[in-house]
Amino acid sequence: MTVAIATAADARGLDEDEPLLLEALARVGVDADVAVWDDRSVDWGGYDLVVVRSTWDYPPQRDAFVAWAEDVAGRTRIANPARVLRWNTDKRYLAELAEAGLPVVPTAWLEPGNVAVLPDWDELVVKPAVSAGAKDTARYGPERRTEAGDHAAALLAAGRTVMIQPYVAEIDDDGETALMYIEGRYSHAIRKGPILQAGARLVDGLFAPEDITARQPTAAECNLAEAVLAAVPGGDRLLYARVDVVIGADGGPLLLELELTEPSLFLAFADGAADRLASAIAAATR
């Protein structure tokens, strides 16, 4: 059994999950190569399975990334499935989940050609609908609404869909809870400290620095995560998933993001997590 772990050239050495996963794969008898997704010399069809992992540079070239995934799917198996990657790499999936009745952080959407009109929320988060690692994302207080509007207008002028959300103040104390699932089964969770600081500059690298600790999710958070996964088109074929939730003003959990494409799975924060993922990958190659 041979597996390709798809990454980005700039992510080499940055994915803390990668060495743990490679060691775990070796323990279950799976030969794995780490390969850059847009390296045209790679024979993807020569692998039993391609596992998309740290392809963190896809946002500026999302169309090429989705086309690559669909091409790979025509040659061999890819996880997560190409149709899921297409759906999940544009955060407008949040609107679909909200329409399905799931509690999602409120979001206003602006399309290229729209005027950058800001919702009447005290603190705003402005970001593009296609993004990863908090890049091109910023938090603005009421005294910086002009800057928030300029940010949104710049993204629109670049042809990018913009999403604007109220900053959930509870994050400052509670952080975010990220729940990891492997083959649809809960594996573990972490707490992610506040990432967006008021007045901070935009992220320069592939992702923003994160403060991570292990966390036990609440029953309400688990119930929401499972309801979200049940609503994913093609979700019955997910190898991995990460559901990021925050606590809203009423004390209930809200979906912040659903990560099905290239999420860090924080394998180091739970005993056996890397082995669970490796076993699922081994099973998927059979």
Image: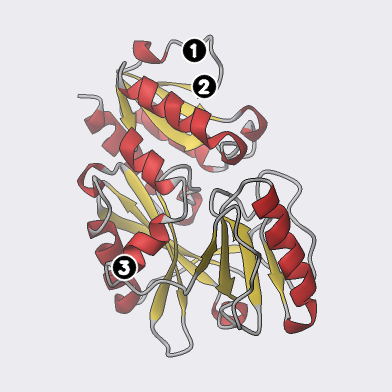
Residue 132, numbered circle: none
* Residue 153 on image: x %, y %: 70, 59
Nearest the camera: 271 or 78? 78
Depicted 68 relative to depicted 209: above or below: above
CA gap between label 2 and label 3 equals 38 Å
- Cβ–Cβ below 8 Å for labels 2 and 3? no
* Residue 282 on image: x %, y %: 27, 30
Which circle, 1 or 3, is nearer the viewer? 3
- Dot 3 amino acid type: Glu
Q: Could you tell me if residue 30 is visible in this image?
A: no
Q: Could you tell me if residue 166 is visible in this image?
A: yes
Report the quarter where the C terminus lies.
top left
Residue 35, numbered circle: 2
- Dot 1 amino acid type: Val
Question: Which numbered disc flags the more N-terminal residue, 2 or 3?
Answer: 2
Residue 99, numbered circle: 3
Residue 194, image quadrant? bottom right
* Residue 127 on image: x %, y %: 62, 59
Q: Could you tell me which residue is drawn at 66 percent across and 59 percent down?
A: 137
Question: Which numbered disc flags the more N-terminal residue, 1 or 3?
Answer: 1
- Dot 2 amino acid type: Ala
Left or right relative to 27: residue 203: right
- Cβ–Cβ below 8 Å for labels 1 and 3? no
Question: Which numbered disc flags the more N-terminal residue, 1 or 2?
Answer: 2
CA gap between label 1 and label 3 equals 40 Å
Depicted 40 relative to depicted 182: above or below: above
